Amino acid sequence: MSTTPTPPSIVRFTSSNFSMRVIAAAIILLFFYYAAGVVITLLLSILLAYFLDPAVEFLERLGLPRTLGAMVMVLILIAVLPAVGYGLWARTADFAENWPKYSSVLQQAAGAVEGKIRGIEGQVSEIAPEPGLPSATAGRAEPGVVRTLIFRGIGSLYALFLEITFLPFLAFFMLAEKRQVWHGTLQLFPASRRTQVKETLEDLRDVLRDYLAGMTMLTLIVIGASSLFFWVIGMEYPILTGIVSGVLNMVPYIGAVMAWLPAFVIALAKWRTFGQFVLIAATLTAIHVLAINLVAPQLVGRRVRLNAVAITIALLFWGWVWGGMGLVLAIPITAALRVICDHTESWKPIGRWLSA
């Protein structure tokens, strides 16, 4: 009994198909990286539209035309954000005036750490001296690094300009023309698949709404708890530091550790005992862990359904592609990918892995 060999043409076709997918993925990744300002602005506009859509629908049920309701909600947002920004700016300006006090403390702490590192290096060099350039030349900054940081800063400013300028308009158009956009999106697919696409979009809408509403409430809770803790222990700028702690809570896992740094910087000007910093780190970690494990499941719900490994990989990947904004957008992007995988037959194993 002989087996029938696989025709070479089929093997070549399968290999070519896989190569085309890899090339397409690489092109998409390059587009996301170099067009970060455009893509981030578009994603933020979509999230903002999903966030404001329930309020627009409520105004529409009260008899207000959808276009007018969308305009009202966007104008309210435009009015609220500058007011919040002004309050933050006033506290930040006050902190900036006192920055020399904190910078001198940081320089002293950095000098002490540097001295200990040099002592360790001296002990190592006595054991195994290595020939090379003097240590003074090793710490010299490379001009290329400085230029790179400048260009990255310009890119960030450009992205910020795009977000501030286009985000309200995009969100308004998405809200005002929701039905036309919805219908036009369905028309992009064959008639046989439109029911599946409609279910996918509805599931995606529910997931993103739950995530945005839940994370907003969760962030406010963490801001309130952190600010109260900083006020109780008598630390300066408790509200400003609490706001930073709440915003960093939007970054899962590592956000709890990142919240230590601003608090430590302000605490250095008042305390020098190790126990005080342990108290700050332990309390902030407890607030973030309790918020994520006890409050988040009740507010965000079970719709996001992402496992810890998937979340960590998403944070690493999107943080590498887009920096800090990638850390904020990693979870909604991955949750949207999981929804698409759940409604696509060939991608269902990926969806099960993401939610396992």
Image (cartoon, rainbow, N blue to C red):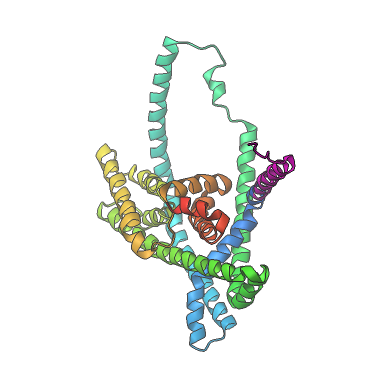
Towards the viewer: 256 or 117: 256
Residue 101: image quadrant is: top left
Q: Is residue 95 above or below residue 264?
A: below
Q: Residue furthest bottom?
A: 63
| Above/below status of 74 relative to 166 | below
- Residue at the extreme right: 9
| Residue at 68 percent of width and 40 percent of height | 6
**Which SS does the magenta portion mostly show?**
helix
Could you tell me which quadrant the N terminus lies in? top right
Q: Is residue 276 visible?
A: yes
- Relative depth, front residue between 169 and 18: 18
- Range of residues picked out in magenta: 1-28
Q: Is residue 146 left or right of residue 237?
A: right
Task: Point out residue 59 in the picture as x, y percentages from the top left corner.
Answer: 49, 83
Q: Is residue 68 left or right of residue 106?
A: right
Count of number-bearing discs: 0
Q: Is residue 206 above or below residue 232?
A: below
Whether residue 273 can be seen here:
no
Q: Going 57% across and 55% down the picture, which residue do you hit?
A: 346
Residue drawn at x 54%, y 62% as measured from the top left: 343
The answer to whether residue 20 is magenta is yes
Name the residue at the front extreme.
1
Residue 25 percent across, percent down from the top left: 65, 48
Q: Is residue 185 magenta?
A: no
Percent of width and height locating residue 158: 64, 54
Q: Position of residue 141 (x, y in %)?
A: 58, 30
**Along the viewing direction, whichever of 130 and 285 lies nearer the viewer:** 285
